[in-house]
Image: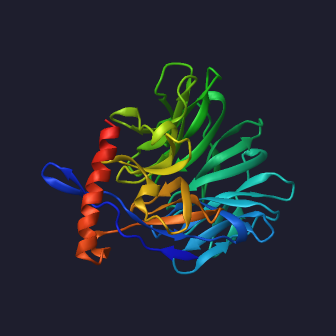
Amino acid sequence: MRRHHLILLGTLALVPGTALAVPAYTITDLGTLGGDFSSGSDINANGQVTGDSGTADGVPHAFLWDPVTGMRGLGTLGENYSSGTGINARGQVTGGSTVADGTNHAFLWDPVNGMQDLGTLGGAGSTAADINDIGQVTGQSQNSNDLSVTFLWAPEAGMQDLGTLGGGYSFGSAINPEGLITGSSETSDGVLPHAFLWSPDNGMRDLGTLAPFPSSSTGYGINAIGQVTGETETVEVPRRAFLWDQVSGMRELGTLGGRESAGFDINAAGQITGTSDPADGTTRAFLWDPVFGMLDLNDLILPGLGWDVLEEARAINDAGQITGYGFIGGQQHAFLLTPVTVAEIPEPETLALIVVGGIVLGLGRHRRRQ
């Protein structure tokens, strides 16, 4: 494990009557389980990360990374493959793993009981996507009719079929503390999937799209107040990240200058992480902030630390810590970004340069997104 510290790249942007901090980060290389790749999928309130990593045998295994103990493999449900997709504040991890018959099953791992098979809805396979702090899990499972549908698993109730938006399949991507779930589902017209919001009281609600038919949308992340992020696309317009809320509905978040973007997670402050392409056609991890708009995370860490590029920012917690994956020394590694405060800047001369750099960076990006 390597830990690098950066000097704050951008601190202040001019806003009438106030001063606001442009985000900047330290970066931690989370390493691997002995193989040549890893990827971070989710992060909890304590800064613990889950994802998957290649072992020395080259097989992907789910991992739990802890700021104190580093990365540990979580094993499998008996066969070679596993992947961690969600982690809650108790350090419980969910994801998917192959079982003896070669199919994939959703799992729940905790430090006491290890990896538990969550079963299916009566069909062959299942996979979990996310877990909240009371241990509720969502994902997708085949049911007894061989349809792949969203499930809600709870410790006492087991696995519940949440149905679809009228079509043949659905997938639960994320669950918030109140048990609200987002994901995607085929609609009754059977053409393109739509993002949904499921609640215990109202069932599955279609969140629509940003364009008339034919168009699609997928929800990937949901925060504590029910805001959703994901992606939407049409035949003419490539995928674009969106933010949906109860008041304003769905709005596009733009790109880093290229054609595509996708939002993967959203925290309580409304900050969104995802991936986008700039004008040069590469792939870059982004942070979308309600004040500053979409920022390239590669611009918010100090260059020269060995990282080639940060490609995907998969998750963000309420403290603003971010995980995902990038490339360092030509290898794909999971990372942890931790916000830097002004108090961590040691020298006044450095701070003066940072203030100027932050103003230029913040205002420049703001103009490009107006």
* Residue nearest the observer in this picture, 54 or 268: 54
Q: Residue furthest bottom?
A: 68
Which residue is painted at 52% across and 80% down in the image? Answer: 68
Which of the two residues, 324 or 112, is positioned nearer the viewer here? Answer: 324
How many labels sit on residues?
0
Residue 265 in sight here:
no
Left or right: 61 as drawn, with respect to 271: right
In the figure, residue 79 lies in which quadrant?
Answer: bottom right
Q: Position of residue 54 (x, y in %)?
A: 72, 65
The residue depicted at 65 percent of the width and 50 percent of the height is 159
Q: Position of residue 46 (x, y in %)?
A: 46, 70
User: Which residue is found at the position 81% from the left and 65% from the top?
Assistant: 78
**Which one is nearer the viewer's eye here, 290 or 14?**
14
Say left or right for 247 vs 254. left
13 up-or-down from 262: above or below: below
Is residue 24 visible in the rendered image? The answer is yes
